[in-house]
Image: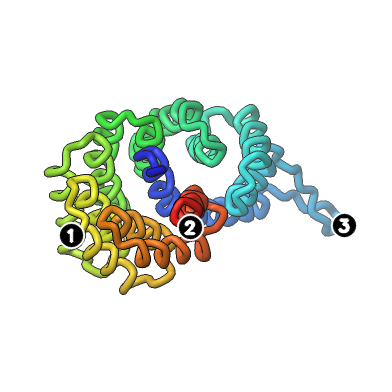
């Protein structure tokens, strides 16, 4: 009952999307307030005669729902916003994120591609297009996108793009390049628990469970409540027939991330190990 690479990459993608969504929310709220300020006409009685913008309303509602992970409601409002403002790259990007949240990366692809076409420097959209390709197991397409994002000096999450690139190489089975990308990140930022866990995944795929345990342990030393790291540590312990240690790790994963795919998989392992 091992998780597929697709499920691994979907979890990884989520770790990086939250920051971009929150930035979009704050920036868009500020833009909407500015729009309302400059578009209001004051009547002779001193009252503002503001004309509501339906596209802005639906966009803001969609962003709020995305922040709450209410993807169905986000999908509705962002689709309405797209109808009213079809050439807005931010609307298209967040609509793509809603599709990814609904586990439909195939539908997200078109929205993210159009967002990038309208705004070629939109590295956040390009990064999440790469994540969609990971979910679809289109490794070479993912690698192409992540390389572009990684080289964008103006993108403030290049480290995340490098980790994603390493995971794309992992999915492709190119372990040498996966290690190269991830070890370079670890050298620059050894306290990043995500890169430590990702390195552990590569070592595990290379059938080097002891080395994977070293990396998972480093990740947990940095972030003890890292549910995914507990899960993968359990897998490595189980492969080495360390049943007691595996149970402890899977129990921690269930405790920390019970409603996630990894949490449910950990629960399945615990049922098998009774």
Q: Nearer the viewer, mark 2 or mark 1?
A: 2
Cα separation, mark 1 vs mark 3, equals 74 Å
Could one spot residue 242 in this view of the protein?
yes
Q: Point out the image quarter for the N terminus.
A: top left
Q: Position of residue 97 (x, y in %)?
A: 51, 40
Assess disc 3: are there few (<14), some (14-19) or many (≥20) residues with their C-alpha within 10 Å of its C-alpha.
few
The residue that disc 3 covers is 45
Q: Position of residue 174 (x, y in %)?
A: 17, 38
Q: Secondary structure at mark 2?
A: loop
Q: Nearer the viewer, residue 135 or 55?
A: 135
Which one is earlier in the sequence, the residue at label 1 or at label 3? 3
Residue at 15 percent across and 56 percent down: it is 184
Q: Quadrant of residue 19?
A: bottom left
Q: Nearer the viewer, residue 176 or 53?
A: 176
Which one is earlier in the sequence, the residue at label 2 or at label 1? 1
Residue at 54 percent across and 35 percent down: it is 99
Residue 274 has which mark?
2
Residue at 50 percent across and 27 percent down: it is 107
Q: Secondary structure at mark 1?
A: helix
The residue that disc 1 covers is 211
């Amino acid at each position: 009952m091992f998780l597929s690479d697709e499920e691994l990459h979907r979890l990884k993608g989520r770790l990086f999307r939250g920051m971009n969504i929150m930035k979009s929310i704050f920036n868009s709220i500020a833009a909407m307030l500015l729009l309302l300020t400059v578009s209001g006409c004051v009547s002779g009685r001193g009252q503002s005669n503001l004309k509501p913008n339906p596209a802005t309303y639906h966009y803001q509602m969609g962003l709020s729902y995305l922040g709450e992970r209410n993807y169905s409601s986000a999908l509705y409002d962002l689709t309405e916003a797209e109808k009213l403002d079809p050439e807005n790259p931010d609307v298209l990007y967040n609509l793509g994120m809603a599709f990814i949240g609904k586990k439909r990366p195939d539908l997200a692809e078109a929205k993210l591609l159009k967002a990038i076409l309208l705004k070629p420097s939109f590295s956040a959209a390009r990064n999440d297009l790469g994540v969609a390709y990971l979910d679809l197991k289109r490794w070479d397409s993912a690698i192409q996108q992540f390389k572009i994002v990684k080289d964008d000096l103006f993108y403030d999450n290049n480290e995340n793009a490098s980790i994603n690139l390493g995971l794309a190489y992992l999915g492709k089975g190119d372990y040498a390049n996966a290690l190269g990308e991830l070890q370079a990140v670890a050298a620059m930022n050894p306290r990043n628990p995500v890169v430590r866990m990702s390195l552990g995944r590569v070592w595990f795929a290379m059938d080097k469970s002891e080395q994977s345990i070293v990396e998972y342990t480093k990740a947990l030393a940095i972030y003890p409540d890292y549910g995914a790291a507990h899960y993968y540590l359990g897998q490595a312990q189980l492969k080495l027939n360390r049943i007691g240690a595996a149970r402890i790790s899977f129990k921690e994963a269930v405790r920390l991330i019970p409603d996630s795919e990894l949490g449910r998989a950990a629960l399945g392992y615990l049922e098998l190990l009774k």
